[in-house]
Image (tube, rainbow, N blue to C red):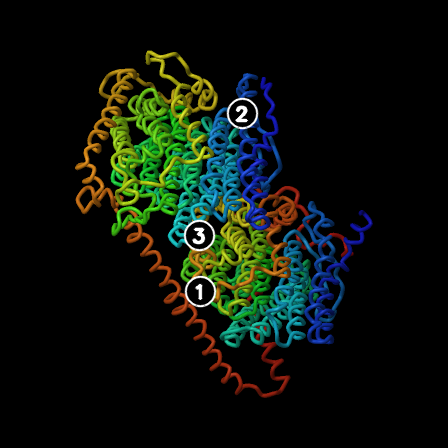
Amino acid sequence: MSALAGFYQGHWILTALVALPLVGAAACLLVREFQAKHVALAVSTAALLLSLPLFWTFDVAEAGFQNAVSMEWIPGWGVSYAVGIDGISILMVLLTTFIMPLAVAGSFSYIQKRQRAFYAMLLLLETGMVGVFVALDLFLFFVFWEIMLVPMYFLIGIWGGGRRVYSAVKFFLYTSAGSLLMLVAILALAGVNQGQTGEWSFAYADLLQTELGRTAQMWLFAGFAVAFLVKVPVFPFHTWLPDAHVDAPTAGSVVLAGVLLKMGVYGLLRYGMPLFPEAATDPTVLTVLLVLGLVGVIYAAWVAAVQPDAKKLIAYTSVAHLGFVMIGVFGLTRQGIEGGILQMVNHGVSTGALFLLVGMLYERRHTREIADFGGLAKVMPLFATALVVVALSSIGLPGTNGFVGEFLILLGTFQTRPWIAAIATTGVIFAACYMLPMVQRILFNRLDRDENRVLPDMNLREKLVMAPLLVMIVLVGVLPGPFLVRTQASTEALLVRISRDAPAAVDSQAEPGGELPPLAGEPGGSRP
Amino acid sequence: MNLYEPVFPSLILALPLVGAVVNGMGAFLWKDNKIIPSVVGPGVLVAAFALTALNTVLFWRMGAHDPSVTGLWTWIESGDLRVAIDLQLDQLSLLMCMVITGVGSLIHVYSVGYMKSDPGFSRYFAYLNLFVFFMLILVLGASFPVMFVGWEGVGLCSYLLIGFWYENREYASAGKKAFIVNRIGDAGFLVAMFLLFGAFGTLDFIPIMEAAPGSLAYGGLLVTGITLLLFAGCTGKSAQIPLFTWLPDAMAGPTPVSALIHAATMVTAGVYLVARSSVLFALSPVAQTTVAVVGAATALFAGTIAIKQYDIKKILAYSTISQLGYMFVAVGVGAFTAGVFHLMTHAFFKALLFLGAGAVIHGVAHAWNHGDEGNQGAADTPWAGDPNDVRNHGGLRKFMPLTWVFMWVATLAIAGVFPFAGFFSKDEIVWYAGVMGNPAVWAVSLSAAILTAVYMTRMMMLCFHGNNRTFGGGSGGGLHEAPPVMWVPLAVLAVLSLVGGWVNIPSSLPLPDIHILGDWLHPVFAQAEAVAEAHGAHHEYVSPVGGGEALWAGISTLLAIAAVIAGFLWLRGSRSRAAELAQPAGGVSGFLHGKWYIDELYDRVVVGPLQAIWRVCWTIVDDGIIDRAVNGAGQAVRVLGWVGGQLQTGRVTAYLLVFMLGAALVLGILT
């Protein structure tokens, strides 16, 4: 075991996780049409198996980066190939590798045209996503961030339905408009750093040392924040999401909700807050971000409650769930941030599962209108059971994963911003108001349509896709400890770092001052 | 020193969970097998009851005083917060477990007969077992969050069981309504927990209750906020004003479910919560008064509705709401033992009433399905074909004599007639409302007690006495007594309804001096009583208008007997019975029959406007404003793109120049 552990502490594992899907994507293009899906499933499963031991080899006491490496890439520009994982990214990486095989398997019968290109795009997307979570160089991060956009654009635009081109273009333009501002901010930050050190560097560890005045922090934070807030998405930048979800193929929705939506909050935690602590803890900035999150929680739930299209409904619930995450993270407490990170995982699992389930209905009936269903529990009892469990997880019933995340978020933020958290708590009521009517109108009531009477229940492949998600829902709900503990050291380090600038805004539990633990950004050893 | 060691406390929980899993698998794998659920479903409950009884006896015999906490695993740990899955066995939780597993066992056995021909037999027992599992978590949890797991878990099972016959849209909607209305209260419960964590840094019962008198100011804003928010949760779960509307609709579920969940156990969870947090409530006179006033108002209000309902289960539902109101009066005035006492006796007689009603409904439906006469009740009436409607009953005493006897036992018990169980518990509540509460609460409680006797007698007369109307007149052939699997549990509950009150007898009555319950629960509530005493609660043991407890116990039982006799005589006459059976057209009767039109009010004032706002948010704000602005910006960019296109010279050096200028500008701003 210790040999394996030592083996797994190397950086190669992260590099392999980035490279493997890319190789797989190429392989998909080379094989015959009907083989592509099997290649994609094999590759994404291999990536999952490869990443899984990280969960155990990860040192929970270490706040800094693990499996880290930094190598020169473009020395003239100070660009390096630097990767590593810490408590903020490890669960995101594992979430990505966990979701991918399910998204691939969920597409087996859904995707009928241009399969090779489809699965190549999915795997390319995985490379981009893993890259975003492991990158520790801002240039590298930006490259992965942009790589991710392209396959998603094509997934929606080619294999989507409805107004797929409109939705794809909207997704692309909206997110890349945000990214451009981030690029400017990255360049400016590196420029300031160059002015201070005399050397160009995009390495995260170097840029963390940059001395920035208050105004500069505000501007640069704004540049990053716009990109991330669009990605979250935070109200009022959310309207690309329902369109993208409705028109995306199932796998696109699963990956979009499951992983892509975490990039925004991840970016804020990884870059926005530690790089610009003064801006990120400014009371006005915090209030704005918290209120936007709060509006998302309430408003998106309201809009979700009156959606006739199941996929659009779920899309709006994502806005509400990510609103909770925002509230947790910017409450600046241990519980809020750890709960926020856990809730990102939970949202990926639950909402991914919801999109897979709606996809199963769409494959059977070629409609997603809630009103076209009713009484399905009679003919699809297994499907009904799965949908009820997932819906309960989505509305945060205790015993499921959703409760643990929401509880920590609200409890944590209540200690610093009681009114925000108290109002956000009403979100649990509205969650029931959007989810239970949908469940009722799909599963319950009379089975009054002839088309619905003959629907087959889940087949073996569909059962195998849903099973891991259902297991995760209960496992995290009952035993969240192993997941939470992996976020703790890095969360504490993050709070310590930002509380040096604004102790008042941060929950006192972080104990500002005293011996500083190694900061997220001083890689655990592999840098000389 | 505590010699008592809990015997397999987690097994008490695990047994029903195993039952739920086995029956849940059965719902898919051996759907038509009725033997496995019939054995496993009640079997795990009986085993859990035996284990609970063993623990209770040991607790007692060992003379244990302090709670015994068994830790299972750490659930949520983050920063200073640590929530463990700990089970707390003490006098209060053991008593609750006895009621839950005891009454639960009887109802499970009864269900074997009641649900015999239902295709969802295994699924039914899976839900019912799961309910018991969550209910036991609710009472055994040693902290607020673990209790909350049970709290929402029983809500889930309630939702699933109300909508058990989900193909009926109304039933499915009733389940959904129950869940959503409960969630309103649950939000209050959650915020109360956040406040508690801020104040104590823990959410475990024992440290909070120990620290509370020292660290929370008596009557302070914080403790008042905490307790009122907790009580908001209670109004949802225990169907008090203003969140009671879901409970009458919940009668859509199978009748044993109504007996177990919506009468005997789950709906009393709010009372349990107040009793469990007795120290906190004792610290806030405002919250206590609120609890007592809401309880008294609900008791009276629900009683007035019960008096004009025809659906036998709705009558019992409003009766339950009313009786829960009594329990809140008790815990609100600080008579925690009385509240828990009534919780227990109510579990006996209300479960009996519901199961008896189930026997009636089952009998009528069965007779309609198999009888030789075609009419299902009086033809051409709105209630034709409804086996729940007392207008389709009448004279059932001839066909179901056992059920008739048992139901009368329960009726006298709930009416508070000596020597039945309800006499002792209700009398204690009314008495303490007068002594420790205020005169208004006392007077309302007393009048609601008379109302109880009236509506229950009315129900019994319309259902069991007079002529039979099941087949629109005629012989009532095909009606017969329920099978033994159903009436034996009734018999056990009837015995409990008869003797269950003799565990706590006021010393002032000329009866044997028995205080088993009061002595048993005393350690749990001692601290709350100490708080009340320390803050000057001193009671003259006379009622607001004079007279001691024995006198008023006599008066109230005489009033109840008088009300029963009056109702009996009134509805025995065929003319007055016919008048009572006619649909109330308007006036006060119509108003009461229409349930004060509270549902309509909520629909018009809350649900309708909210849904209108939601639609506005979607169509006008989201699609109309935000998305149009986004697309407008896209259009503007397209125009700019055309302008930009004119600047495209194709010369790389020019681009670089512009880029450098821009970068310099940005750097200039920043440094």
Q: CA distance from mark 2 to mark 1?
A: 52 Å
Distance of label 3 from label 1 (alpha carbons): 16 Å
Q: Secondary structure at mark 3?
A: loop
Of callouts 2 and 3, the N-terminal one: 2
- Compared with B553, B229 (above or below) is below
Q: Is residue A293 above or below residue A40?
A: above
Pinpoint residue A287: horizontal percent, then vertical percent. 46, 54
Number of residues whose C-alpha sits closer than 10 Å to that of mark 3, classed few (under 14), some (14–19) or many (20 or more): many
> Does the image show residue B569?
yes
Q: Chain of mark 2?
A: B
| Residue at image mark 3 | B166
Residue wearing tag 2:
B53
The chain under label 3 reads B
Which quadrant would the C terminus of chain B be assigned to in this image?
A: bottom right
- Say left or right for A96 vs B306: right
Give the amino acid type for the residue marked by disc 3 in the picture: Tyr
Mark 2: secondary structure: helix
Q: Amino acid at mark 2?
A: Ala
Which residue is denoted by mark 1 in the rendering?
Answer: A449
